[in-house]
Amino acid sequence: MSVRVVARIRPLLKHELDKDTIVCAESAEGQNPTTVRIPNPKNDAETFTFQFGSVYEENATQQQLFENEVVGPTVKHLFNGYDACIFAYGVTGTGKTHTMRGGKSLADRGVIPRLLSNIYRRCRKIEKDAAGATQVDVSLSYFEIYCDRVYDLFEPPEKRTPSGLPIRDNHGKTVVVGLKEMQCSTLKEFEHLYDQANINRSTSATKLNAHSSRSHAVLCVKITQTTESTVRVSQVSAIDLAGSEDNRRTDNNKERLIESSAINKSLFVLAQCVEAISKKQSRIPYRESKMTRILSLGQNNGMTLMILNIAPTRSYHLDTLSSLNFANRTKKIEVNEVENEPIFRNITKPLAATSIGGASLSRQPLRPLNTAH
Ligand code: ADP
Ligand code: MG
């Protein structure tokens, strides 16, 4: 299966109401839109069109995007033992953070809090249906990649090592070494942790004289389903990427240019990876940036959804076009859906073990979860 790419065009902001809009969504009669149309920057009379899995227009709600794109496919897969990855891509100011995190009100909540709410609801249902024979644990890790360095967002900024955390390969998956993994069994606990981590993200951003849109934020949610005999672990990553704008076109001062070249480098490497994969080249330059190693698009990241965020105004024209071209290549990438097999946890059998004296692992008592959320 390939990466699913959907586009979301954000509404005009208050200060943009008098601006010229150049992006529009189109659909076949009676269908939901699947096409984005944009003029050729060199000749307004000519337009380009791009096809995606779905196109969400300015009036699309957070609920619609979540229900259509995330609940059925992702959450269902996750509980069946598959991994998933959801990421937002786009220029700064196009709605990536709004899409992934969203606002405070219930209606404004973005993909991430809705995903967690849904996961907890399913956990409770599975536990109830299994009448205590299955236990589901949820744990979180959350980090940002800033200037090609990885920082734990569950740590306050003053505790960070300036050089960041190292990353390693672990059986084909890239892991961040030393990252905090927080057990989190209710939505309330999640909200508290997530809000605090987002404060960590923005305070460190201010200290470094940068905006948080200059870092990639990666939330990993690990789900462990334990029965008397098996343990099955699957993971979903939800990523709010740094802004994809071309900084050669913005007049950055020197300090910001250093930062943006590192941000640009990772997004540039991502674009190269996407191109290499789509051309079926044997060498994919994943290892040239930490973000691409971690995202490792087209490797073992399971079902993958990319949300391309777009602003409708002319001021974003060139960047919007380059995002659309990137998204167009991304949708052709094939992803591996590797099922995380359940691991047998108590040993009643192994012949080998029996022959050395019938050694068996002790059966672990199940830790009760807090059921309220
Ligand atoms: P990014 O993270 O891509 O830099 P933001 O998510 O911060 O962009 O969005 C920029 C601004 O646009 C914010 O003020 C945000 O609230 C607003 N915005 C983005 N998408 C929407 C939307 N679908 N509906 C309403 N406001 C939006
Ligand atoms: Mg943002």
Image (tube, helix red, strand yellow):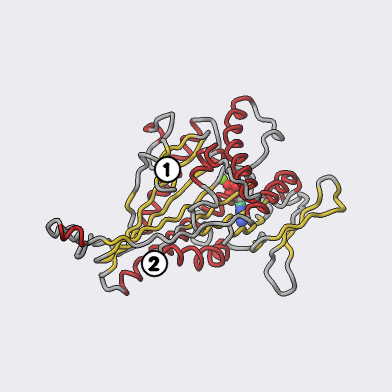
Tell me residue 126's x, y (percent): 34, 70
User: Measuring 70% from the left and 48% from the top, which residue is drawn there?
Assistant: 320
Q: Which residue is mark 2?
A: 121
Location of ligand 2 given as a quarter of the image: top right
Earlier in the chain: of badge 1 and badge 2, it is 2
Depth check, front residue: 204 or 356: 356
User: Measuring 58% from the left and 55% from the top, which residue is drawn there?
Assistant: 306
Say which quadrant the C terminus sits in.
Answer: bottom left
Tell me residue 16's x, y (percent): 71, 49
Q: Is residue 217 left or right of residue 247?
A: left
User: Is 28 rendered above or below residue 154?
Assistant: below
Q: What is the CA distance from the residue labelled 1 to the residue labelled 2? A: 33 Å
Say which quadrant the N terminus sits in.
Answer: bottom right
Q: Amino acid at mark 2?
A: Arg
What label sits on residue 169 in the rendered view? 1
Q: Amino acid at mark 1?
A: Asp
User: Measuring 25% from the left and 70% from the top, which residue is drawn there?
Assistant: 132
Q: Is residue 351 left or right of residue 272?
A: left
User: Is 82 rendered above or below residue 22?
Assistant: below
Depth check, front residue: 174 or 39: 174
SS class of the residue under badge 2?
helix
Badge 2: residue crowd in 10 Å (few <14, some 14–19, many ≥20): some
Q: Is residue 283 left or right of residue 238?
A: right
| Direction left: furthest residue | 357
